[in-house]
Image (cartoon, rainbow, N blue to C red):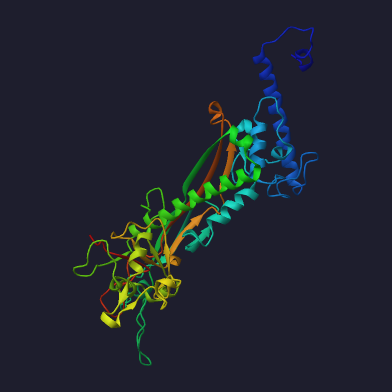
Amino acid sequence: MSVELLHDPSGPALPALVMQAVQSGLDAAVERALKQCLAQQRGAGGVPVAGLGEAMGGDPQAGFRNFGEFALAVKDACQPGRRPDERLLVMAKAASGLGEAFGSEGGFLVPPGFAGKILERIYSANNLLGLTDSYTIQGNSMSFPRNAETSRANGARWGGVRAYWREEGDQAAASKPTFGRLQLNLHKLFVMIHASDELLADAQGMALEQYLLRVATEEINFVVGDSIINGTGAGQPLGILNAPCLITVAKEPGQAAATLVAQNLVNMWARLFGPCRANAVWLINQDVESQLHTLTVGSGSAAALAYLPPGGLAAKPYATLLGRPVLPVEWCPSLGTVGDVILADLRHYVTITRGAVDSAMSIHLRFDYDESVFRFIFRVDGQPWWSAPLTPYKGSNTQSCFVALQTRG
């Protein structure tokens, strides 16, 4: 049946469902033609399609001024009988499979200009991920050969290399290093945010952008940071507190529950591997600060504050212990339990990511609730470089890049 007949007022009246089916078929044909045209244009160097705005290669935000404007365009495009915004139509499916270009196929890909803002915040120096030894990969896993050394004793350094003193003409003894393997596999961190159509209609574009990006990035930051400290390694990164290389320093004899004394910190410092000291940080639960501000070294008239400057409580704290920064973080356990204070060189914690946040939006998932859904996916894995504490060449106490304090209960 021809399209002209469908619109002939003198012709037979067709059910609304038939009209919708025909319209859907026409829309699908247009989408297929647009995709084919876009593929040809990209093959010619990413030249914009005439009348359809800039190609993705020319504008990372696809012509949208902010994330809120993009969200409103998606909402309008998914309303029956409305033609999608031209800027949405040029967003063909990305090679990495981040999403589909058209709403009828499950959602609209968020322009990479907005996704880049999320990535920038995640890698900020104000979070733990930014302090790790991080690698961006293209696949889903990565293997690292690692030094199998667990002792600095003769014959154990570098996993089996040893040098010998020899006179001229003496035969040399052979040795060789051994290596282990560190295998990381990306795990998916998923954030979904529902936004009512009233919010999309009433919110200013920039305000909505700031809100959604802040909520998504803060949640991703929080969960990634928690996994770096507390992760089980099952479906998520292996955290410091569950790592086999962690050293737990004993409390002082007779030490009261939920307390911290200066000797605890001195003992932890003594167990940190020497080359790690220049880059180590103290990670603490914020409840520990009340103990830090009253720590003293010595006794009687010779006692001196261990944490505050000479000006006392009226002066600004140095926020360092033994010259290394003190970082209060939410993920350290409560005062008095293992992990409330952690001395760590996070350069020895390796992470891999896909290097970007997969971001998309759709109205179909919550259509019957009159809500739009924003989806953010971040892929990450991590674990310590070290497989075990290190036995020093001289001395009996093992050393590590991660040191915690025993429970004081």
On screen, residue 34 versus residue 266, left or right, reads right
The percent coordinates of residue 128 (x first, y second) are 46, 60
Furthest toward the front, the residue is: 314
Residue 254 visible to the viewer: yes
On screen, residue 163 versus residue 378, left or right, reads left
Quarter of the image where one finds residue 395? bottom left
The percent coordinates of residue 304 (x first, y second) are 33, 79
Residue 140 visible to the viewer: no
Residue nearer the viewer, 246 or 215: 215
* Point 61% across, 32% down: residue: 105
- Quadrant for the N terminus, please: top right
Furthest toward the left, the residue is: 254
The percent coordinates of residue 157 (x first, y second) are 35, 75
Q: How many marks?
A: 0
On screen, residue 11 versus residue 242, left or right, reads right
Q: Is residue 61 above or below residue 338?
A: above
* Point 37% across, 49% down: residue: 234
Residue nearer the viewer, 178 or 215: 215
On screen, residue 207 versus residue 325, left or right, reads right
The percent coordinates of residue 16 (x first, y second) are 66, 14
Residue nearer the viewer, 182 or 126: 126
- Quadrant for the C terminus, please: bottom left
Q: Is residue 68 above or below residue 78?
A: below
Residue nearer the viewer, 395 or 119: 119
* Point 68% across, 28% down: residue: 28
Quarter of the image where one finds residue 200? top right
Furthest toward the bottom, the residue is: 168
